DNA sequence: CTTATTTCAGATGAACTGAAATGC
DNA sequence: CGCATTTCAGTTTATCTGAAATAA
């Protein structure tokens, strides 16, 4: 086997976050396999149901990606009929996103399986630690967002 | 502006991790711009210096990706001369990875700038909270890895 | 024979830059 | 005019699946 020798050194938070993201994604994709949608599409769809009235550009800013990248993602959800868009009458540049019936049904259908992944992932954490983890992640993200 | 209305609902750890990963990546890529290597290449290179004697297949298992995906990544580092590989004489299937002089120099050169990103990211956390965050992330990853 | 490691070939997803159309 | 939003076109990176060569 000869698994890598550990030399002392600072652990990397950057690496720990990336590793967890990969692990989560692998599990989520497995659960979502039957739907044909990706982990990213699912979590974005879930976000869009939580926060209504968003446009693609706002979503992009919120997610640290370019408007063009988000347009691809939103476009894929729209082509599948999981969201719809209509002009904001108060600012006709914006296209406001709404989760469709079909999108909402899909979310309902997989809500439990996805929650189970989170539950398994945090099985070794107390309720309080779980809440702390969420808050720390948010604070880190905000700290990076607020910078230059 | 009309930024999305918040409806009450469970926050998603899955989403929080993904968001932070995107934010980190954006900052890291910006810092690494002059080198031409990606955030993923950098963190993998750093890992390879921390843990010596690894093969690509081991790295893949450790990272929740397929052996083929990791082979691409390792290949890109090798083509840039940042790592080298040689046969494990005790098991001639394995190709053991070593960080080269050039790879080590690159890591040294950017170590401070990358540490600064972590520092800024965790600026609002106490030393203890920062340590907790790292431990929670690891425990979550292990919990997912140990499952089916 | 089976399994592990690596490699080759091809597909798709997820990000980017650059440029243009439209509305404020 | 300048700036925001969306879209179009093209590119690169990061992942996957499937299949084959080699070694334990």
Image: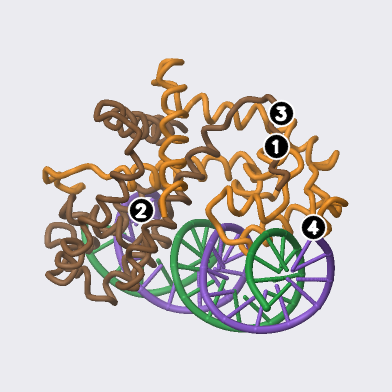
Chain colours: A brown, B orange, C green, D purple
**Residue B24 at what x, y percent from top left?**
49, 40
Q: Subunit of mark 4? A: B
Between the residue at mark 3 and the residue at mark 4, the CA separation in whole angstroms equals 25 Å
D10 or B42: which is nearer to us?
A: B42
Q: In whole angstroms, how far apart are the C-alphas of marks 2 and 1?
A: 36 Å
**Label 1's element?**
strand
Q: Name which residue lies at 76% across and 42% down.
A: B53
Between the C-alphas of marks 3 and 2, the distance is 39 Å
List the residue tagged with mark 1: B51
The reply to whether dot 1 and dot 3 touch (C-beta < 8 Å) is: yes
In space, the residues marked 2 and 4 are separated at their CA atoms by 34 Å
Closer to the camera in the image, A135 or A29: A29
Do marks 2 and 4 both belong to one polypeptide chain? no
Residue ranking furthest to the top? B127
Q: Are marks 2 and 4 in contact (CB under 8 Å)?
A: no
Q: Taking B19 as reference, is B72 above or below it?
A: below
- Which residue is rendered at x = 28% and y = 29% of the image? A126
Q: Earlier in the sequence, mark 3 or mark 2?
A: 3
Answer yes or no: do the residues labelled 2 and 1 have beta carbons within 8 Å?
no
For the residue labelled by badge 2, is the local secondary structure a helix, a strand or a loop? helix
Residue that numbered label 4 is attached to: B79
Mark 2 belongs to chain: A
In the image, B98: left or right of B9?
Answer: right
Image spot of residue C13 (x, y percent) = 44, 67
The residue tagged 3 is A7
Label 3: chain letter? A
Asked if the residue under mark 4 is in contact with the one under mark 1, i.e. CB atoms within 8 Å, the reply is no
- In the picture of the structure, the residue carrying the numbered disc 2 is A60
């Amino acid at each position: 086997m000869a698994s890598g020798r550990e030399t002392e050194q600072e652990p990397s938070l950057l690496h720990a976050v990336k590793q967890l993201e990969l692990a989560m994604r692998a599990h989520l994709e497995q659960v979502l396999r039957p739907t044909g949608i990706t982990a990213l599409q699912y979590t974005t769809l879930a976000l869009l149901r939580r926060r209504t009235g968003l446009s693609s550009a706002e979503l992009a800013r919120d997610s640290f990606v370019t408007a063009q990248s988000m347009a691809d993602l939103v476009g894929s959800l729209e082509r599948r009929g999981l969201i719809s868009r209509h002009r904001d009458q108060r600012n006709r540049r914006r296209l406001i996103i709404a989760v469709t019936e079909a999108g909402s049904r899909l979310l309902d259908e997989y809500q439990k399986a996805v929650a189970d992944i989170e539950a398994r992932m945090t099985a070794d954490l107390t309720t309080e630690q779980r809440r702390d983890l969420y808050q720390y992640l948010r604070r880190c993200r905000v700290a990076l967002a607020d910078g230059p």
